[in-house]
Image (tube, coloured by chain):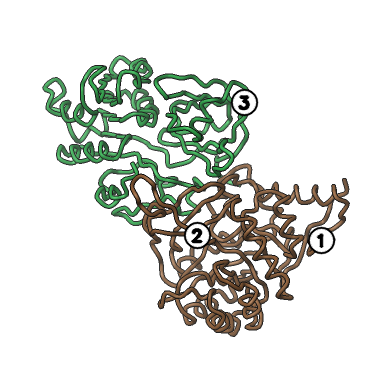
Amino acid sequence: MGGNKSYQKAKVLANIKIATGIFELTISTEIAKDVQPGQFVTLGSLVSNKILSRPFSVYDNDDGHVHLIYQVVGPNTNTEAYSKLRTQDSINIFGPLGRPVVIDNQIENLILVSGGCGLASLYPLARQAVQREMSVSVMAGFRNKGSVFGINDFKGLAENVSVRVATDDGSEEFQGNSASLFTNILVDSSITPLDVTKTAVFTCGPWPMMKKVAEIARQAEISCYVFLEERMACGIGGCKGCAIKTKNGVKHICKDGPCFKAEEIDFEEVGQDERY
Amino acid sequence: MKDINLSTEIAGIKMNSPVMNASGTFSLNNLEISNLDISKLGALVTKGVTMEPRAGNKSPRLVEVPGGLINSVGLQNLGIDIFLAEELPHWLSLGLPVIVNISGQNNIEYTRLASKLNDTGIAGIEVNISCPNRGGTVFGTSPRLTHSVVQSVKQVSRVPVIVKLTPNVTNIALIAKTAVNAGADVISLVNTFLAMDIDPVTGRALPGRGFGGMSGPAILPQALYKVWQVCQAVQVPVIGMGGIFNAEDAIKFFRAGVSAVAVGTGNFINPLVMSKLVDDIKEFLSKIGCRQLQDIIGTVKFS
């Protein structure tokens, strides 16, 4: 049948702790060759009384491997079970899922603002931007020094990728969150005057942070995109479980997203759920 | 191993196998899965369609609970007219019998839906009597309402009518008998069990609407009991569902007396599960020395 999605059993190539409670899982799978920026895969549940597959943004991919970054969220969770996977272990993987993100043609400056593991969703965009010779500014927020990851991956992409780190406790670089870094960059004379029509910001992380970033972008008239998250079952738009009401009608995070234009999202309505 | 022929016929609907999907758990989007093979399935059941478009319930719509899932989607769909014009042709092009699940708020809506589906090429309709009507009563919990809605639909429909029961009743055999007396050609069950969760930290009721319907492996024993009760009560074919994920699960329902099984939440766990289920049922039957499905239907023993 049509389509490039596939559900299969795949082998773990590596599973490395890259920061406090944060792991990078590398899976050998032919799904990898079809993954586009903005897309995700789901991994089968390993915890016996949990049934749903878990969605993860693809951090990086080549023809034969996907790299996923995840945070262990607690005992008896699937993320804890995934953290115990070893090379050659098998896991069910389904993908690629979600709508690929293609950065608009007129964009020359890409700003990426993340909180915690949200940074993982943004790496493929940085890769795309570098290939298209855009300048990339990354503002990555973390809880503390121990939870910082991925910075060298972004820096390694190209000379003109700048990375700023914010930590909640100030243990690494700037103290505060990445939304504040974003505010600062807009008033920073070395960047401004920024041609707002040639700039786009993508953000992924906790809801209050993304809401703040979207608000700052709106005021600065910079186009803004947010990565949303929601409980999902099928991952392909069939079960209608991850529906959100947008200004353009009901959309599904798994199929129409997970990346949406911020102006489509009613932050008050969605934010009421307090689930981010 | 000699290949066991699982093809069957239910109320005149010819099926390659007694395995189909539960309404709302398999969509046209599943066809984007390159390694999915639907050719072995008996029929495809569409998501519930209503007269008017429905945006569905507030989020979050899903809660995972031990061994299961509580959903509160709220029959999100584009309405019958768009369904007929844009979606149904795709379903009909797949080469399998198509059963359209319908939901109305009153008898008039159900009969209008059934009329609109006449002469469209579908194999049957599944009447979902588990949704609340305008008065807040669920049709399927009242023998009187069940009788009137099934009778109304039967008066206009020119395809076999499957009536899908809610398990949230005291005496499901009574509801099933009532539906059959009103003309139901097939009974399917169970729809989901009413359930809720509460976030222990925030106190918030989940799903967002405050409650929903539970499905998944955790409900299988409850579903099996309701299905067995119905199989005892009626002479028409029964389609059983509720937590079925593998051949052993399906065989339990066949032993209880069903003519076919449907997979719901299992499709979310593994989108390829239905095709595998057909193969595994054959292997299971062969292993225990059965030559045909018929040998096992209704063979539950009490001793």
Amino acid at pointer 1: Ser
Q: Position of residue A74 (x, y in %)?
A: 44, 33
Give the Cα distance between marks 3 and 2.
35 Å
Using the image, tell me which numbered label, if any, was put on residue B303.
1
Amino acid at pointer 3: Asp
The chain in green: A
Give the chain of mark 2.
B
Quadrant of the rendered structure where residue B28 is? bottom right
**Mark 2 crowdedness (10 Å alpha carbons): few <14, some 14-19, many ≥20:** some
Q: Residue at x 55, y 41 (%)?
A: A5
Q: Residue at x 74, y 59 (%)?
A: B16
Amino acid at pointer 2: Gly
Q: Position of residue A174 (x, y in %)?
A: 21, 20
**Mark 3 crowdedness (10 Å alpha carbons): few <14, some 14-19, many ≥20:** few
**Mark 1 crowdedness (10 Å alpha carbons): few <14, some 14-19, many ≥20:** few
The residue singled out by tag 2 in the image is: B213
Q: Are marks 2 and 1 on the same chain?
A: yes
The residue singled out by tag 3 in the image is: A89
The secondary structure type at the circle numbered 1 is loop
Sequence-wise, the earlier of marks 2 and 1 is: 2
Quadrant including the C terminus of chain A: top left
Q: Which of these two is toward me, A248 or A164?
A: A164
